[in-house]
Image: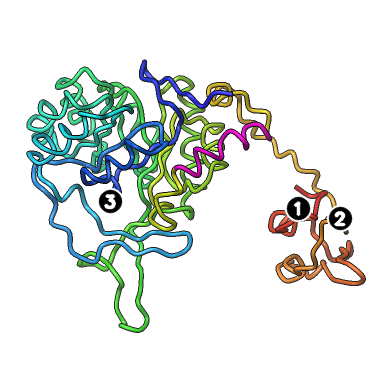
Amino acid sequence: MSLKVNLLGVEFENPLLPASGPSVGSLHSLVFFNQSKVGGIVTKTISIEGADVKKPCIVAGKHTVYNTELWSEKPLEEWTDKILPELKKDLNKPLIVCAGYTSDDFKKSIPHLDKFADFFEVSTHYGKDSLHDLVSTICSLTDKPVFIKLSPHVTDFIDFIDVAIKAGASGVVAVNSVGPGVCIDLGKRSVTIGTEEGHSWISGPAIKPIALQRVMTIRKHYPDLPLIACGGVASARDVLEFILAGADLVQMLSSALINGRQVYNHIVEDLPELMAKHNIESIASLRKTPLSLEVKGKGGYPVVDKDKCVLCHKCTNICPEMAMRQETYIVNDSDKCIRCGLCESRCPTGAISGVI
């Protein structure tokens, strides 16, 4: 069983990487990832000047992170004179350097960053009108592969990617955070964090379905385009789902902000067992497996396995038609049941079958 990924001639030990953001904005954080089990490293977005970020800037719930972060708070010189040279001394993984934002910025930054990068990831501020000039500028400054990070707010994202590819981009990272949103502190009668307009940006497991749809759609239109997934990853299962949807590599950040950095190693450790369970020989073979768009659930009435049922009553509590009830054990009232599948999807012991 192999977790290895070869992308544009660069080998990654496994498909999981940190995403650009607050967890990869300092030397000690990057050293942590170099010593961890992730397959590669991504830096925080580096620009000419360090960002002036109003604090507080990050809060989280169980499934969502809100942030008002900008790019790196450290200037270009600190990255090129201290952070990246120190990291490079013992670097044992591929390094994706994230850079922003304008053509003028790139003319100054890319020549200094180029010797450290295996790939570049470019934040573009998502304007398609200036995208061609921006991408062509950075591609003229480096022979390293350039990946464009896609915002979920770009609705015509296939056209957006077309422009980037024609300008010289090698691949895409999909997707960035969602928003704007609002996070409110009821006690203080104010936003918890926010811009002057009260806005913040949303990431974490809650946005996974949006990211999956983007990855799946991009892969359908571009069968061979190098594609890195990002958005909502929290488990080994999420990683494999993104690979099946069409990703070559998978980035994660917000779930570690919610649950701690140990989640990276746990996911990598969990991958072989989950792959064996689902008869997946390698990450490369899963990537080549077509994702069927045919719904294969039975669509029948729920069947309850009495040996697995622990009478937790989750199904009876959530059934939209109150069709699940307890007699001696849990039974389904077929006169009420609409065969939606909710009970099966939420059963914690896998005691319900027959619908999905």
Mark carried by residue 22: 3
Q: Which amino acid is tagged 3?
A: Pro
Q: Is residue 264 above or below residue 215?
A: below
| Secondary-structure class at tag 3 | helix
- Asked whether the residues under the numbered discs 1 and 2 touch, taking CB atoms below 8 Å apart as contact, a structural biologist would say yes
Horizontally, residue 160 falls left or right of residue 239, namely left
Tell me the CA gap for discs 3 and 1.
37 Å
Q: Which amino acid is tagged 1?
A: Gly
- Asked whether the residues under the numbered discs 3 and 1 touch, taking CB atoms below 8 Å apart as contact, a structural biologist would say no
Of the numbered discs 3 and 2, the one sitting upstream in the chain is: 3
Of the numbered discs 1 and 2, the one sitting upstream in the chain is: 2
Location of residue 199 by image quarter? bottom left
Residue 253 at x, y = what percent?
38, 47
Q: What range of the chain is rendered magenta?
A: 265-277
Q: Which amino acid is tagged 2?
A: Asp
Residue 146 at x, y = what percent?
27, 26
Mark carried by residue 253: none
Horizontally, residue 301 falls left or right of residue 228, namely right
| Secondary-structure class at tag 1 | loop
Tell me the CA gap for discs 3 and 2.
46 Å
Tell me the CA gap for discs 1 and 2.
8 Å
Q: Which residue is mark 2?
A: 305
Of the numbered discs 3 and 1, the one sitting upstream in the chain is: 3
Horizontally, residue 10 falls left or right of residue 115, namely right
Residue 73: in magenta span: no
